[in-house]
Image (cartoon, rainbow, N blue to C red):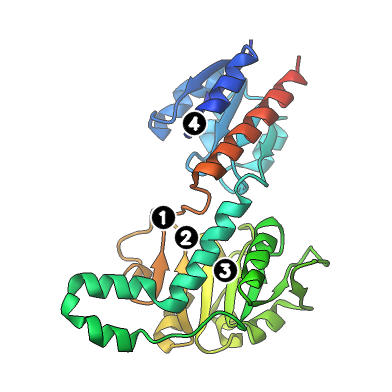
Amino acid sequence: MFKVLIADKLNEVAVEMLEKEGFEVKKAWDVPKEELEHIIPEYDAIIVRSATKVKGHLLEVAKNLKVIGRAGVGLDNIDLQSARERGIKVINTPNATTNSVAELALTMILAATRRVVTGTERLRKNPSEFKKLKKELFSVEIEGKTLGIIGTGRIGSSLAVKAKALGMKTIGYDAYIKQSGVIDLQSSIDKVFEKADYISLHLPLTDETRHMISDEAFEKMKTNVVLINCARGGVVDEEAAYRALEKGKLAVYATDVFEKEPPKEENKLLKHPNVIMTPHIGAQTLEGNYRASVQVAEKVIEALKELK
């Protein structure tokens, strides 16, 4: 009988699917992360989302581990090389939360444009400013504006479809994808920087993409550009983003992710009035969680059955 450890919360349907196959399942999402190393040695598979890091000592003590299931897309919380060296199969669910993340990116585009957060915060503090705010929060429409998408895979393409439905022009760049039916692909990332009124990031954090959005990148962008980051915090140099905000080069930085999560209190972006931020909730929807849970359970079941 295979043993499966679920370290981060999944929909109960996934637990039922695993148990139906005769697997012994332990729900450990309430177990402190530092205690997982005492539990994992006896398990054949572990399922995680983004909160649990399967790296270092945890992998070293996982003597029986054969499968790592990631309910979601990003794999930066898993030491892929170490897993490969140990013969551990790593699987994820790249399609499960595509729509959820794309919807959040679109939400941020609209919220940044119509200054929803600023209006809410100031009206809550001082209702008497109602008429003054009405004049101050004069804005524009997104129809006819150009959205630049960096990373034109599943999420980037899903966002493009939604943005085009609202009348936006969609251009993009991807180092690996050279064709798209919904995005006007540019020959270089600099072309996107030059043309886009909004830039949305949808790419993994790698050595190649770390701090891709730097002081140099901001200098190539339009003045008053809106930057949306629903990818990974490290793709953006946060100090550079702060400087761009202070200069007025960057109108709004709307981010769901930070270089360090949770961000430290001294992070300047936390208190900047032109930053919209959410606590990494891109995939946190009922529908996305259900799809990710079902798909990761299916893939873990398949992987373990292959070992029999």
Which residue is found at the position 47% from the left and 24% from the top? 27
Spatial CA span between label 2 and label 1:
6 Å
Q: Earlier in the sequence, mark 2 or mark 3?
A: 3
| Type of the residue with mark 4 | Ala
Judging by the rendered image, the residue that carries numbered circle 1 is: 279
Q: Is residue 264 left or right of residue 303?
A: left
- Give yes or no for contact between labels 3 and 1 (Cβ–Cβ under 8 Å): no
| Type of the residue with mark 1 | Pro
- Give yes or no for contact between labels 4 and 3 (Cβ–Cβ under 8 Å): no
Judging by the rendered image, the residue that carries numbered circle 4 is: 7
Judging by the rendered image, the residue that carries numbered circle 2 is: 256
Judging by the rendered image, the residue that carries numbered circle 3 is: 211
**Label 3 residue SS:** loop
Q: Nearer the viewer, mark 2 or mark 4?
A: 2
Q: Is residue 105 left or right of residue 93?
A: left
Spatial CA span between label 4 and label 1:
20 Å
Residue 105 position in % (x across, y down): 54, 64
Q: Earlier in the sequence, mark 2 or mark 4?
A: 4
Q: Nearer the viewer, mark 3 or mark 1?
A: 1
Residue 14 position in % (x across, y down): 57, 27
Res 288 quadrant in image: top right
Residue 244 position in % (x across, y down): 46, 82
- Give yes or no for contact between labels 2 and 1 (Cβ–Cβ under 8 Å): yes
| Type of the residue with mark 2 | Asp
The foreground one among 189 and 13 is: 13
Asked if residue 272 can be seen in this view, the reply is: no
Residue 238 position in % (x across, y down): 46, 70
Neighbours of disc 1 within 10 Å: few (<14), some (14-19), many (20+): few
Q: With respect to residue 103, does 269 lie above or below?
A: below
**Label 1 residue SS:** loop
